[in-house]
C-alpha cells in the first residue's frame, strides 16, 4: 500500500453533524501520486459537504463508480453512494437438481452491484490504509489467509460488483484486528461486531457464495472464538464450513464444482489458505466438547499445503508441498503456516479418535490407532522443535501456534488413556498398559519442559507486540495449567510443575489484555484452585 493513503484521513463537521469522508474515496487514491491524492481528496470533501456528485475529468474514478466509455463520468453514476442497485443473482438450480445439466460458472457470476450503506462507510472511515496495515501487522502474522496482492487489486479495480464484498471484508479485518476497550462494553456487545454480523447477512444475499463472504465468516468466527462468544463461534464456523463445501474446496477432484478453475494461482492459493484457516478454528473449538462431529471433512488425497509465508506475503508464485507424506522432514520447504496446517490435521485425527472410541467394538484396533497417533505426535513434536531453530523472526508467531496445537493434540490423546481407572469390565490388554504409561510420561514431560517453553515464548511475544498475540494459544495454556493443578493436588508434582503453572497463568493474563477468551480461562482456573 502507498503511504499517500494517509492523506485521506480528514474529518469535518457539516452543519453541526459529524460526517466523514466516505471510505471509497480513499480506496481510489491507491493508484494516484501524492499531489494527485490531495487534489482528488479536496474535491471529494467539497462534494460530500455540498451534497454534489463528484466529477473527475480524467484518470481513475472514485471507488464504486460505474464503468463508462467516456473520459468524463456522468453525474448520475458517480459512486456507491448513488442509488444504484441490481437484483440479487439467480443461483443455478441445476447445481442441486440435475448436475448433468449443470456447468461450472465464472467466479463473478453470483455477484450484483449494490451501494454501500452509509453506516458501513462510516465504520470504514476515510483511510483504508489504516485497516490494511493494522490487520497485516497483527492477525496476518499468525493466520495469513487474505492476499495482500489481490486485496490491492480489488480496491484499485473500482468494480461496483466487488464493492459490497470488499467493504465487508475490510470491516471484518478491522473487527478482528482491533484491540478491545478495557473500560468499554464486552466484545459480544461491540457495535462494530453487530454491524459486521448484520452486513454479512446483506452481502450473503447479494453474493451468496463469494470468496469475500467466506473470508469474512472466518474473521467473524475468529473474533467470536478469540473473545469467548459462545455458541456463536461454533455456529459461525459451521456456517463457514458449509460455504466452503459449496465452493468445492474439500475435494476439487470429485465434488461437483460450482465455479470454474480459479482465474489465477494467487486466487487458488487464497482459497486454499482460507479453507485451512477455517478448519484450524474448528479444530480449536472442538477440543472441549466431546461427541461433536467435525464440520470440515478430512482432506482429500492429493491435498496441498499452503506455500511459504514469505512468497505469499510478497505475492510471488511459490511451490506447494503435499499434505500426505511418509514422515516429517525439517529439510522440506514448508512454510510456518503450512506447519500449523499439518498440526491441525493431526489434531483433527485425535479429536475423531476420541469421539468414536466409545462406539468401537474392537478395543485392540482402537488401541493400535492410539499408539500410532502417539508415535505420530512424538515425531511431530521433534519435527517442530527442529524447525523452530531454523526460522526467522517473521515466522515466530506462527511457530508458537503450531507448537501450541501440537501440545493440545497430545493432551487430548493423553486424557483418554492416562486415567488408571478402567472404563470397561473386560480384562485389560497389554496395549492399554503401554498406552497409559506413555500418556502419563507425556503429560509430565509437558509440565516439565514443553509447557514452560511455550508460556515463555507467548510472554516474550506479547510483551514485544500484544497485537500479534493469538487467541488460539489460550486453550493450550489452560490445558497445561489444569494438568499442573491436578498433579500438585495429588502430591505428584515435579520440581518445575509449580513454575510451569505460574508461567501459564502469567501468559494467560497477558493474552487476556488482547483477547477475552484468555481472561475466561483464567477465571475457570482460579475457580478450580479455590474448590
Image (tube, rainbow, N blue to C red):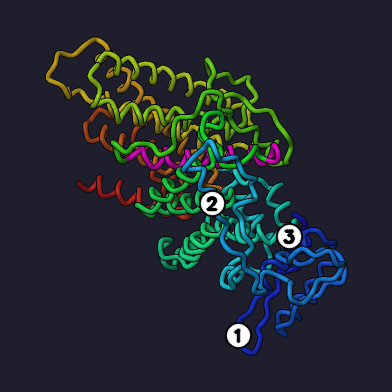
- Residue 286: in magenta span: yes
Work out whether residue 394 can be spotted. Answer: no
Q: State the image coordinates of residue 23 (x, y, percent, origin top left).
A: 67, 67
Corner quadrant of residue 71: bottom right
Q: State the image coordinates of residue 93 (x, y, percent, origin top left).
A: 51, 48
Rendered position, 44 above or below 331 = below
Residue highlighted by disc 2: 91
* Main secondary structure found in the magenta portion: helix
Q: Which residues are magenta?
A: 263-288
Rendered position, 58 above or below 396 = below
Q: State the image coordinates of residue 47 (x, y, percent, origin top left).
A: 75, 80
Element under disc 3? loop
State how far apart marks 3 and 1 are (Cα).
29 Å
Q: State the image coordinates of residue 189 (x, y, percent, origin top left).
A: 41, 65
Rendered position, 473 above or below 26 = above
Q: Nearer the viewer, residue 440 or 97?
A: 97
Element under disc 2? loop
Res. 158 mark? 3
Name the mark nearer the viewer: 3 or 2. Answer: 2
Corner quadrant of residue 52: bottom right
Amino acid at each position: 500500500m502507498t503511504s499517500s493513503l494517509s492523506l485521506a484521513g480528514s474529518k469535518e463537521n457539516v452543519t453541526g453533524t459529524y460526517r466523514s469522508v466516505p471510505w471509497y474515496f480513499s480506496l481510489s487514491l491507491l493508484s494516484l501520486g501524492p499531489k494527485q491524492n490531495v487534489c482528488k481528496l479536496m474535491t471529494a470533501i467539497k462534494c460530500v459537504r455540498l451534497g454534489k456528485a463528484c466529477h473527475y475529468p480524467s484518470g481513475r474514478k472514485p471507488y464504486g463508480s460505474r464503468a463508462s466509455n467516456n473520459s468524463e463520468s456522468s453525474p448520475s453514476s458517480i459512486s456507491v453512494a448513488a442509488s444504484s442497485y441490481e437484483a440479487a443473482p439467480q443461483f443455478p438450480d441445476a447445481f442441486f437438481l440435475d448436475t448433468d445439466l449443470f456447468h461450472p460458472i465464472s467466479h463473478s457470476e453470483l455477484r450484483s452491484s449494490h451501494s454501500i450503506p452509509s453506516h458501513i462507510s462510516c465504520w470504514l472511515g476515510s483511510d483504508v490504509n489504516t485497516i490494511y496495515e493494522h490487520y497485516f501487522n497483527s492477525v496476518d502474522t499468525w493466520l495469513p489467509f487474505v492476499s495482500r496482492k489481490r486485496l490491492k487489486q480489488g480496491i484499485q479495480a473500482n468494480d461496483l460488483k466487488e464493492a459490497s464484498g470488499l467493504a465487508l471484508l475490510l470491516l471484518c479485518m478491522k473487527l478482528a484486528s482491533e484491540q478491545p476497550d478495557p473500560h468499554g462494553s464486552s466484545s459480544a456487545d461491540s457495535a462494530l461486531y453487530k454491524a459486521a454480523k448484520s452486513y454479512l447477512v446483506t452481502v450473503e444475499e447479494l453474493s451468496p457464495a463469494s470468496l469475500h463472504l467466506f473470508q469474512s465468516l472466518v474473521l467473524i468466527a475468529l473474533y467470536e472464538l478469540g473473545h469467548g462468544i459462545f455458541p456463536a463461534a461454533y455456529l459461525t464456523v459451521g456456517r463457514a464450513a458449509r460455504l466452503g463445501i459449496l465452493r468445492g474446496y474439500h475435494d476439487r477432484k470429485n465434488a461437483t464444482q460450482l465455479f470454474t478453475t480459479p482465474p489465477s494461482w494467487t486466487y487458488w492459493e487464497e482459497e486454499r489458505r482460507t479453507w485451512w484457516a477455517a478448519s484450524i478454528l474448528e479444530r480449536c473449538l472442538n477440543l472441549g466438547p466431546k461427541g461433536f462431529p467435525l464440520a470440515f471433512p478430512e482432506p482429500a488425497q492429493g491435498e496441498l499445503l499452503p506455500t511459504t509465508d514469505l512468497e505469499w506475503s510478497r505475492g510471488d508464485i511459490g511451490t506447494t508441498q503435499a499434505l500426505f507424506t511418509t514422515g516429517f522432514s525439517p529439510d522440506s520447504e514448508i512454510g510456518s503456516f503450512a506447519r500449523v496446517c499439518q498440526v491441525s490435521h493431526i489434531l483433527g485425527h485425535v479429536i475423531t479418535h476420541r469421539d468414536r472410541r466409545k462406539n468401537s467394538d474392537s478395543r485392540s484396533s482402537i488401541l493400535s490407532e492410539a499408539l500410532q497417533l502417539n508415535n505420530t505426535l512424538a515425531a511431530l513434536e521433534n519435527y517442530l522443535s527442529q524447525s523452530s531453530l531454523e526460522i526467522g523472526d517473521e515466522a515466530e508467531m506462527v511457530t508458537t501456534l503450531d507448537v501450541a496445537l501440537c501440545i493440545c493434540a497430545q493432551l487430548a490423546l493423553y486424557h483418554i488413556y492416562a486415567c488408571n481407572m478402567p472404563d470397561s469390565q473386560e480384562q485389560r490388554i497389554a496395549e492399554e498398559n503401554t498406552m497409559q504409561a506413555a500418556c502419563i510420561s507425556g503429560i509430565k514431560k509437558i509440565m516439565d519442559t514443553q509447557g514452560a517453553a511455550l508460556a515463555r515464548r507467548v510472554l516474550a511475544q506479547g510483551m514485544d507486540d500484544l497485537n500479534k498475540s493469538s487467541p488460539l494459544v489460550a486453550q493450550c495454556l489452560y490445558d497445561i495449567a489444569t494438568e499442573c493443578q491436578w498433579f500438585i493436588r495429588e502430591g505428584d508434582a515435579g520440581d518445575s510443575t509449580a513454575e510451569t503453572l505460574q508461567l501459564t497463568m502469567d501468559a494467560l493474563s497477558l493474552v487476556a489484555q488482547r483477547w477475552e477468551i484468555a481472561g475466561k480461562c483464567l477465571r475457570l482456573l482460579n475457580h478450580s484452585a479455590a474448590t
